[in-house]
Every structure is written in structure tokens, then in C-alpha cells.
Amino acid sequence: MWTPEETQVVFLALRVALTVVAVALLPGLGVAWVLARWESRWSLLLRGVVMLPLVLPPVVTGYVLLRLFGRRSALGELWFAVTGNHIAYTTAACVLAAAVVGFPLLVESMRLSLAAVDPRLEAVSRTLGRGPWATFRSVTLPLAWPGVVAGAVLAFARALGEFGATIVLAGNIEGETRQIPVAVYTLLNQPGSTAAVTRLTLVSVALSLAALLAAAWFGGRRQRRFAG
């Protein structure tokens, strides 16, 4: 039977994933545009840094974040001085860990869409008197929009499944940082929890599959748009 604790776990996971998308979308779009339009050895280095969390073990990523934003770190103390709250072992830590791990997926999808936009269309817009920002808003972004949405959906799905970096930076605090993967890990160590594990697993599979199908649909729209 479904329990209030399981409901809390699912809603916390959804809230964290949605917050990740809201926080990372604009920075990701900016980085993607730089990578799509700026060609130099420094852009290659930037892309390597952006993609690094995708290849690092999540536990290593979590440890790096803990060293940077832990309660005794310089950034952690600065954040506490400004906000009066800590980052580590809070819901904010879940958002930070998931955002860092999912950022490469977000940026790469956006970069591919932005790179596929014909620069001649942007040049025509500029000759019509539009500035760089107006051209980006009225020409580049609408053409790349399916890839932008696909990247956001992939980041959302990645946030739902994040475990390694989260468990290191945020811990396992009921009602605060215990999301679906952490809850499943916790229940696996408790006798008689098979039914609860199964329910949470099915919810996780359903949410992740829905997000992946949505990302594939938007990716298909991107390909059809540029093919046409």
C-alpha cells in the first residue's frame, strides 16, 4: 500500500528536478551559444570542462562539490553569511548536485540545435536592422527551440535518477534530501521492504521513460525542422 513517506519522496524528486531545469536553463543556453558560435582552442577547453561531469564518477563529482560547498569551505561559509543557510545536506544540495551532473546533457542538446541554425538567416536579420539580442530572440531561438526543450527534458530525467553526487553532498535525510534513488537504496537495506522498493522503482521507470520519450519527440521535431 502506498505510504505518505513514498509520496513525500516522489514529490521531493519532482521538485528538485523541476528546480534543476529552472536554475540551469538560462546558463546552459548561454554556454551552448558560446560553444556553437565561438571556435578556438579555448572553446574546446570550455567544452571539456562542461562535459567533465558526464564522464567523472558521480561520487567523485559529489566529493568535489562537497569540498567546494561544504559547511567548512570558503564558498559554503560565504553562502551562509549571505543567506543564513547551508548548502550541504539540504534540498539545495540535491539541486546543486543534480544540476552539475545534468548540465552536460542540457548544454550539448542546445549546442547541437544552435549550431544547426543557418548563420545566413541571422545575417539577414541583422541587415534588416535587428541587433544581436533581437536576432537571437526572433530568429535563432525559435529555430533551436525543440533542441532547447529536449535538453531541458534530458536534464530533468537525469535529475530524477541522480544518486552518487547527491548522496555525498546532500546525504540521506528524510523529508529533506531523500529522493527516489536514495529512498530505494535505503529500503534495500531494510527487511520486508520489497513492495515499497517495487512501487518506487515503477514510478521512477515511468517518469524517466516519459521524459526520454518527450526528449526524443522534441529531438525529432528539431531534425524535421532543419531537414525541411
Image (cartoon, grey):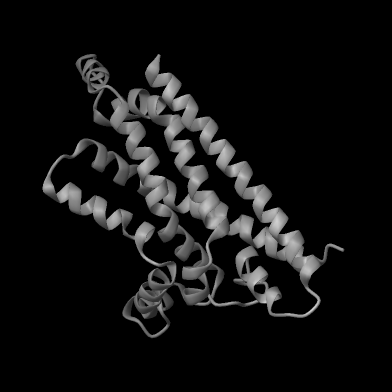
**Residue 140 position within the rendered picture, expressed as x and y whole percent measured from the top left:** 33, 27
**Residue 69 position within the rendered picture, expressed as x and y whole percent measured from the top left:** 39, 75
Tell me which residue sits at (41%, 46%) in the image: 106
With 103 as the anchor, is 191 left or right in this view?
A: right
Q: Is residue 85 visible?
A: no
With 178 as the anchor, is 216 left or right in this view?
A: left
With 53 as the anchor, is 126 left or right in this view?
A: left
**Residue 71 position within the rendered picture, expressed as x and y whole percent measured from the top left:** 42, 82
Kindly give the residue lying farthest to the bottom in the view shown. Answer: 72
Tell me which residue sits at (47%, 32%) in the image: 219
| Residue 132 picture quarter | top left
Q: Nearer the viewer, residue 120 or 211?
A: 211
Q: Is residue 145 visible?
A: yes
**Considering the image in quadrants, where does the C terminus appear?**
top left
Tell me which residue sits at (12%, 44%) in the image: 40
Kindly give the residue lying farthest to the right in the view shown. Answer: 1
| Residue 124 picture quarter | top left
- In the displayed structure, 9 sits above or below 26; it is below
Tell me which residue sits at (78%, 69%) in the image: 194
With 177 as the anchor, is 82 left or right in this view?
A: left
- In the displayed structure, 126 sits above or below 39; it is above
**Residue 191 position within the rendered picture, expressed as x and y whole percent measured from the top left:** 77, 80
**Considering the image in quadrants, where does the N terminus appear?**
bottom right
